[in-house]
Every structure is written in C-alpha cells, then in structure tokens.
Amino acid sequence: MSKGISGLFKGTRGFLHALAEDVFDRFMPNGDKNIDFSRLPGSTGIQVKKRLTDKQMTFLTNEYGVEFAQVYERGPGKNGRGGKYTIYSGTVNSVTIPVNRNTVLINHTHPGGTASPSEKDLKLMALIKQAGSPQRTSAIIPIGKETIKFTSKGKKR
Amino acid sequence: MNISEYTYLWTTKKDEFVLVNTEYGYGIVNKKEQTVLSISDEELEKQLINKMLEEGNKVYENILDAYADV
C-alpha cells in the first residue's frame, strides 16, 4: 500500500490509514489504534514520527511473532532532543540494533514473555555504554507481562 | 537450532562481523554498519561465537576500537 491510501482488512483485522511510507494507523474493531507497517522493519528499520507505546510494541510482536526493538537516535538539541525514533524487527531468536554514542535503546519485546534481562540484554547495555552512549537504563516488554526496566547490572528494582 | 543460516558471519561477511569483549562475554558486532546482532537463544549464540573464533574473525576489547578499524 502506498501513502495516502486507506483500506479495510477482511474480517476483524481492522482499518488502515497511511501515515507515511510503510507506516499505518490500524484501527481495530475494539476501538484500539495501533501502528502497523507494510513490511517488517528488519535490520534496516522504519522511522516513526513519535515513540511507540508499550501496547503498540506488544501489538506488533503479537501480530508478527518476532522481537521488535525501538531505538532513539539523539538529536542536536539539549539533552538529545530533536532526534528520531526507529523500529527494528528481528527473527524469533535475534534482532540487529545500531549501537553508537547517539543511540538509545528505548525498549524491546520478549516474544516468549521472559520477564527479566537475559545475559544478551546485559551484554547489549554494556556495548551501548562502551560506544559512548549516555544511556544507562532500558526496558523489556515481556509479552503478556508488565514492562521491566534494567541496567547493565540487571533488573532495576 | 541451526547455525547454517548465520554462515555469513564467518564467510561472506567475515570482514564486517567481529567479536567485542564485555563483562558478559563476547558480543557479535558489525563494525562497518555499527550494529550489534543480539541473539536471544544463548546456546545458539555460544555456537556462533565459537565458530567465529574458530574461523578467525577479529576480536576487540572495546566496540570503539572495532569501529575505528574499518
């Protein structure tokens, strides 16, 4: 689908409204509004205009069955304002994430529902710190459970 | 669990994919794209890292050293 075109899914999958290339509002029959994409972002990523909510990230993972990650690239403004949000998707077992001094991993989903940071999550935070990013805390959205925050030392109490 | 879909790490893209050491072990990093390949299956990740070491992929102590060596 291209920008400017809206359309109906069959059955109960909702109504689409294009926001930008590859990005749609998806209006669900139960009244929820989710963000959806015309293609999986993959490691290339798809930029979104504003930060997705935990609920929107959960929707994407439930819809496609893979891990999604939300990254903020710090902008030139004070405290990194004026940057951009990009959504990445992986496979069931992996995701590729940009890591440099300007990137902040806002959150990522755990499709299997694991409600704690794994060693790979801690490793990722350690690499983010090595790269010079000011980020020290990130979040995991375990599907079906409450979001948790973590640092490179583990789950934040 | 099949490492065959990741053979590019130590074959066609061997020059790009490196290992970077952290207090939690090695991370798989694409030093050209400045990205990290985060594998959630710990056993699969161990196999991939061991294979990369076996095949001679470069190893760095810090991600910035890897990024500078492009």
Image (cartoon, coloured by chain):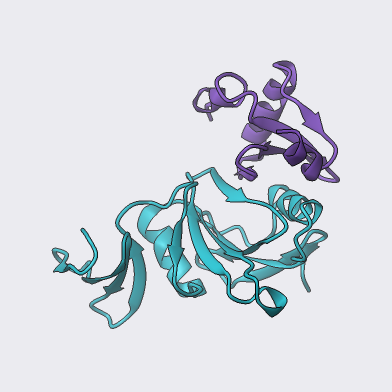
Chain colours: A cyan, B purple
Using the image, determine if residue B66 lies above or below residue A59: above
Residue found at x 62% / y 45%: B35
Q: Is residue B35 left or right of residue A56?
A: right
Q: Is residue B3 visible?
A: no
Using the image, determine if residue B13 lies above or below residue A107: above
Q: Is residue A118 left or right of residue A2?
A: right
What is the quadrant of the N terminus of chain A in the image? bottom left
Residue found at x 49% / y 60%: A87
Residue sticking out furthest to the bottom: A31
Residue found at x 63% / y 30%: B16
Residue A51, horizontal then vertical, whole percent: 51, 73
Residue A15, horizontal then vertical, whole percent: 20, 72
Residue found at x 28% / y 71%: A26
Q: Is residue B52 visible?
A: yes
Tell me where residue B46 sits by quadrant: top right
What is the quadrant of the C terminus of chain A in the image? bottom right
User: In the image shown, does B66 or B19 lie closer to the viewer?
Assistant: B66
Tell me where residue A28 sits by quadrant: bottom left
User: In the image shown, does A6 or A84 lie closer to the viewer?
Assistant: A84
Residue sticking out furthest to the top: B55
Q: Is residue A123 left or right of residue A147?
A: right
Residue A48, horizontal then vertical, whole percent: 44, 67
Q: Report the number of discs.
A: 0
